[in-house]
Amino acid sequence: MPQPGPETVAAEWDPVPSALPWTRAGLEIALVAEVWSKRDATSRPSYVLRPGTKLDEGDVEPEAGFPVESALEPVLRKALASVGFLPPVAGEAPALLITFWWGCFNYSNHSLRPAERRHFLECAALVGGESFAQALGRASDDERSMGPLAMDAFANRDDRTRWLVAQAETNRYYIVISAYDLAAYRRGVSRLQWRVKLSTDSRHAMGDEAVATMLMNCGQLLGRATAGAARLFRPAAGFEALK
C-alpha cells in the first residue's frame, strides 16, 4: 500500500476538520483520512463508483440485518456530492475510481501466531493509520524480547496512544472508502489518491446502526487528510436512515 507523508500530531484530541462538530453521545468512532494525491486541495474531480464489498476479518458470526451494497451506495454518493465529488457529465472523462468495503474486523491476540499478529496490526492501521500500526508493531516486537512493560510504555505515552491501543484490541464494525487514479487503474497500475477509514467498537451498536452512522458522517472527510487518527462522537442512526 502507498504510504502517506508524515502525520502531524493535532493539538486537539478530537477530530481535526473544524467542519465536523461533535457531541459526547452515541457511537465513538475512530477515523483516519489520508491523502496521497498532489492535486489542489479544492479539486473535486468526477468519479466512477465500483460496487462495494462486504469483507469480514477474524472469527465473525453472520449478522442478520447487516446493510447490503444496494443500500449503502446511494448514501455514499450523497456524501460524495456534499463535498463536490460528482459522476461525470456527458462527454466528460472521469478521473477517479472510488471503491468501498465494510464489515466486521474482529480482534486477534497479537502475542500468538504470526498470522494473528498481522491481523492485529491490520486492525491497528484501521483505527490509527499506517504510521500508528508501524509504531505498534515495533512495540509488539519489543514486548516479545523485553516483556510486557515495553507495550505498556508505548500505550501509556499519551492519552491518544492509550485510546488507540485499546481500540485496536476490540472487535470493530468498519467502512473504508478509497479513491484511485482511474487512468492509471485502466493501465493496470494501482495509484491511490485518498482513503478514509472509520470504525467503531462492535459492543456498542448493531452492524446496521454502526455502518449507517459512519457512512452518514463521512462526507467532510472525503478527499481530505486528518492530522493522524481522530475520534468522533455521533448519535447512532438506524438502518432505516439509509433508505
Image (cartoon, grey):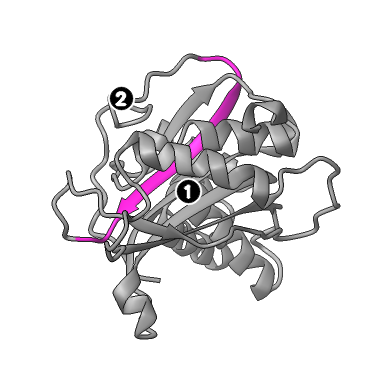
Residue drawn at x 52%, y 45% is 152
**Residue 231 image point, x, y percent:** 45, 31
Q: Quadrant of residue 159?
A: top left
- Asked if 143 appears above or below 68 in the picture, the reply is below
Residue drawn at x 16%, y 57% is 39
Q: Amino acid at mark 2?
A: Ala
Label of residue 106 in the image:
none
Disc 1: which residue: 197
Secondary structure state at the residue bearing disc 2: loop
Instruction: Give the magenta-colored segment's residue range.
Output: 24-37
Secondary structure state at the residue bearing disc 1: strand
**Residue 24 image point, x, y percent:** 51, 15
Disc 2: which residue: 19
Q: Is any atom of residue 64 visible in this view?
A: yes
Instruction: Find the distance from the CA under tag 1 to the CA under tag 2.
Output: 18 Å
Q: Is any atom of residue 161 visible in this view?
A: no
Q: Give neighbour class at mark 1: few <14, some 14-19, many 20+ (Cα, 10 Å).
A: many
Residue drawn at x 37%, y 39% is 81
Which mark sits nearer the N-terminus, 1 or 2?
2
Q: Is residue 235 left or right of residue 38?
A: right
- Asked if 139 appears above or below 235 in the picture, the reply is below
Q: Give neighbour class at mark 2: few <14, some 14-19, many 20+ (Cα, 10 Å).
A: few
> What is the count of numbered marks?
2
Q: Is residue 120 left or right of residue 76?
A: right
* Residue 62 or residue 241, whichever sits in front: 241
* Residue 235 or residue 230, whichever sits in front: 235
